[in-house]
Image (cartoon, grey):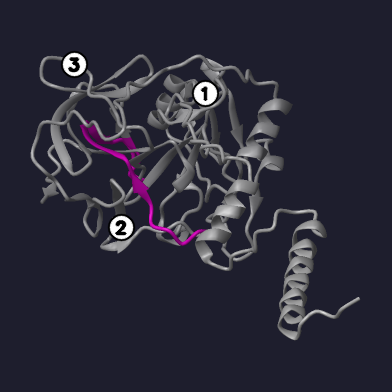
Amino acid sequence: MKSLPLFRRKNLSAWLVLGCSVIAIVGCSDTPASLPSTSPNAAEATSAAASPPSKPAATAVETELPYKFPLTGLPTDKEVKSRPFMVMVENAPQARPQTGLDQADIVYEILAEGEITRFVSVFQSQAAKTIGPVRSIRPYFVEIGDALDAVIVHAGWSQEAMDMMAGRKLAHLDEVYGDGAYYWRATDRKAPHNLYTSVDKMKQGAEARKFRSEWNGPLLTFAKEGQSKLTGAAVNYIQIPYIQGYFVSYEYNAAEGVYKRSMEGKPHLDRETGKQLQTKNLLVLESKHKIVDKEGRREVDVFGPGKGVILQEGKSQQITWERKNGMLRAYAEGGKEVPLLPGNTWVQIVPEGTALKME
């Protein structure tokens, strides 16, 4: 056989190498013969093709709770028919700062005897773990608790108040007379300014005494949040003089929509939390007062009618007030009840003619 010319052998070798390369690339691979790209767009496209299509993110749906707390109008998931507790809380200087008033649904401040006021604090929606200091009760405090159908909680009494509770067979827990197991004394304060209780303790006492636990009223009227119906002047600050040297004031906090409470020019704080007491609704009610003995005990009208003012969301309105259907209620001109805003309420009951400072 004749040998091929040199140039033809070189060309043939080149074609053989090229053919083997093509066979190696195409025939020896299980995947198509395209080379991977290193560009970011290509990588994203590959990843997107390999992943299943994403579903739209679930949108949280706010479900309105079906029930309201009767004394605050705030929403809850269960119907509330539990009987409230009304606790007498002291306000002598030795008792300050108090504990638990920040968790009360309603607080009434009323003159007791001499130059001191006392707090009538009503608990239903919150289970306060410490409430006090607890002190004695007077007849007009009994009237408030009886109308509310609350379990009355106190430590001592005036004779007239005890006669009322006994005669009406009212449910009450008295630390002085047989119910001491449902109270305790703090060791860092001196008696009698160191007596405390809690919602759990009061429930234990009510159960042991076999008091009725069910409650069916009275009910309050509430507007929707942020929909105050007041028609009077703007009021961002109010000062309420009770007696010489003792005054209460409230200042509106627009960011929180509440009135912050002070006593004698200083923020009124809760002893345990250190937070300033505040209220969503503030009522100042003028009432007939009469001193009845040398100790300075008083008769105070808690039935009405009388004059007053209500404050909500930086607004005010002159009102008349009267006890109807178990509660002290505010009425606008024409007799229509002024609704409260959802939240807590403080009621300042003052002697007729008290000069309020409002700005």
The 10 Å Cα crowd at callout 3, few under 14, some 14 to 19, many 20 or more, is few
2 w.r.t. 288: above or below: below
The mark lying in front, picked from 1 and 2, is 2
As rendered, which of 320 and 341 lies closer to the eye? 341
Magenta highlight range? 272-298
20 w.r.t. 147: above or below: below
The mark lying in front, picked from 3 and 1, is 3
Check disc 3 and give the amino acid type.
Lys
265 w.r.t. 16: above or below: above
**Residue under the point 29% across and 25% down:** 223
The mark lying in front, picked from 3 and 2, is 3
**Residue under the point 48% across and 31% down:** 61
Check disc 1 and give the amino acid type.
Met
Q: Does the magenta stretch include residue 273?
A: yes
As rendered, which of 218 and 246 lies closer to the eye? 218
Residue labelled with disc 2 = 263
**Residue 332: percent from left, percent from top:** 15, 22
Asked whether residue 30 appears in the rendered view, the answer is yes
Q: Do the residues labelled 3 and 1 touch (CB within 8 Å)?
A: no
Check disc 2 and give the amino acid type.
Met
Q: Earlier in the sequence, mark 3 or mark 2?
A: 2
284 w.r.t. 250: above or below: above
Q: Are marks 3 and 2 in contact (CB under 8 Å)?
A: no
Residue labelled with disc 3 = 336
**Residue 36: percent from left, percent from top:** 64, 63
Q: Does the magenta stretch include residue 242?
A: no
Going by the image, does 352 lie left or right of 186? Answer: left
